[in-house]
């Protein structure tokens, strides 16, 4: 059984990619509003699913975020089979639905990083971030035929630099299978969130993945408002 694509982005992909980058900045600005309160009410060893659920709950309760977009936990993308049936392609940790159109969404796959074992040693988990996160965009399990996908790294010990270095090493090691083009491209931080982007080409299809590293530690109060200038309607 083969599937065909449900979501189609028309027009110049570069133009669409710029819009998705702007939507990502908007989304991260809103995440920053609620992030520290989410961290404060979760146990230090929380699983990534619990963190994502708390984050989506915080966003749905935030009046500013609700007025700008819809965020869905465990978002389900679909594809059509040749005989017209719709099939589920897995569950994305969270998605920002653009203009209430479920075919246009920013997917956010979330993974923990820098997890401290009971004996005090640290597991980077960068390989899991790549193999069970980034790779799902390369295979088009997520963000099929869309120019952009997103990753959240919950950095459990707050050491963002170490997390980025280990992710870079893991991605470089898997450069061929990831279709990685060039190196990690730094982006301006949003609050305490460190950001970078990667470009990938696979099977003639290109996709940009936007990465954000979020410190899962006690932090400052978030700013009052997200970056409104980042928001763009289709």
Image (spheres, rainbow, N blue to C red):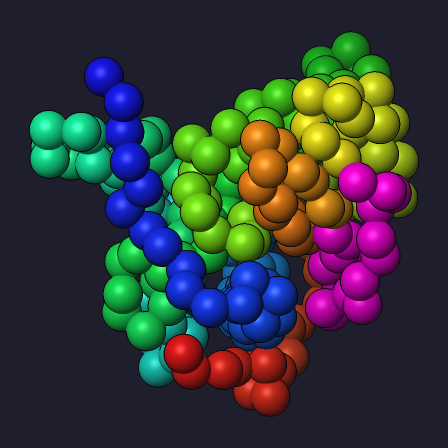
Image label count? 0
Q: In the picture shown, does residue 123 fall above or below 146?
A: above
Q: Quadrant of residue 32?
A: bottom right
Residue 207 is at least partly visible in this image: yes
Based on the picture, tell me whether residue 196 belongs to the magenta stretch: yes
Looking at the picture, how far across and down is residue 180, in whole percent? 76, 35
Residue occupying image coordinates x 79% and y 40%: 181
Q: Residue at x 47, y 52 (%)?
A: 146
- Residue 190 lies in the magenta stretch: yes
* Rendered-image quadrant of the N terminus: top left
User: Magenta stretch?
Assistant: 181-197
In the displayed structure image, the side of residue 196 where residue 109 appears, left or right:
left
Relative image position of residue 192 (x, y in whole percent): 76, 62
Q: Is residue 38 left or right of residue 208?
A: left
* Residue 205, quarter of the rendered image: top right
Q: Is residue 155 above or below residue 56?
A: above
Query: Which of 27/121 is in front?
Result: 27
Task: Label the magenta part by its dominant secondary structure.
Answer: strand
Q: Is residue 218 above or below residue 121?
A: below
Image check: 200 left or right of 85?
right
The foreground one among 82 and 214 is 82
Q: Quadrant of residue 194?
A: bottom right
Which residue lies at the image location 49% right of the left edge and 82% below the top edge? 232
Do we see residue 48 in this rendering? no
Q: Position of residue 12 (x, y in %)?
A: 54, 68
Would residue 123 be found to the left or right of residue 134 on screen? right
User: Residue at coordinates 42% horizontally, 42% vertically from top-left?
Assistant: 144
Q: Position of residue 179 (x, y in %)?
A: 71, 31
* Quadrant of the rendering where the C terminus is positioned: bottom left
């Amino acid at each position: 059984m083969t599937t065909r694509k449900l979501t189609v982005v028309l027009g110049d992909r570069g133009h669409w990619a710029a819009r998705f980058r702007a939507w990502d900045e908007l989304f991260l600005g809103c995440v920053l509003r609620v992030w520290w309160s989410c961290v404060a009410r979760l146990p230090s060893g929380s699983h990534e699913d619990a963190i994502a659920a708390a984050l989506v709950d915080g966003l749905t309760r935030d009046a500013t975020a609700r007025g700008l977009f819809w965020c869905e936990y465990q978002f389900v993308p679909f594809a059509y089979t040749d005989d017209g049936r719709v099939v589920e392609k897995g569950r994305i940790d969270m998605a920002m639905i653009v203009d209430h159109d479920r075919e246009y969404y920013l997917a956010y796959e979330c993974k923990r990083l820098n997890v401290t074992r009971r004996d005090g040693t640290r597991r980077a988990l960068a390989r899991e971030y790549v193999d069970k996160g980034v790779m799902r965009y390369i295979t088009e399990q997520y963000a099929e035929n869309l120019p952009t996908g997103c990753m959240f790294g919950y950095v459990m010990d707050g050491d963002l630099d170490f997390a980025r270095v280990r992710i870079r090493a893991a991605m470089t090691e898997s450069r061929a299978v990831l279709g990685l083009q060039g190196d990690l491209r730094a982006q301006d931080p949003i609050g305490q969130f460190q950001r970078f982007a990667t470009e990938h080409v696979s099977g003639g299809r290109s996709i940009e993945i936007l990465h954000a590293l979020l410190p899962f530690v006690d932090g400052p109060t978030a700013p009052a408002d997200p970056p409104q200038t980042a928001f763009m309607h289709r």
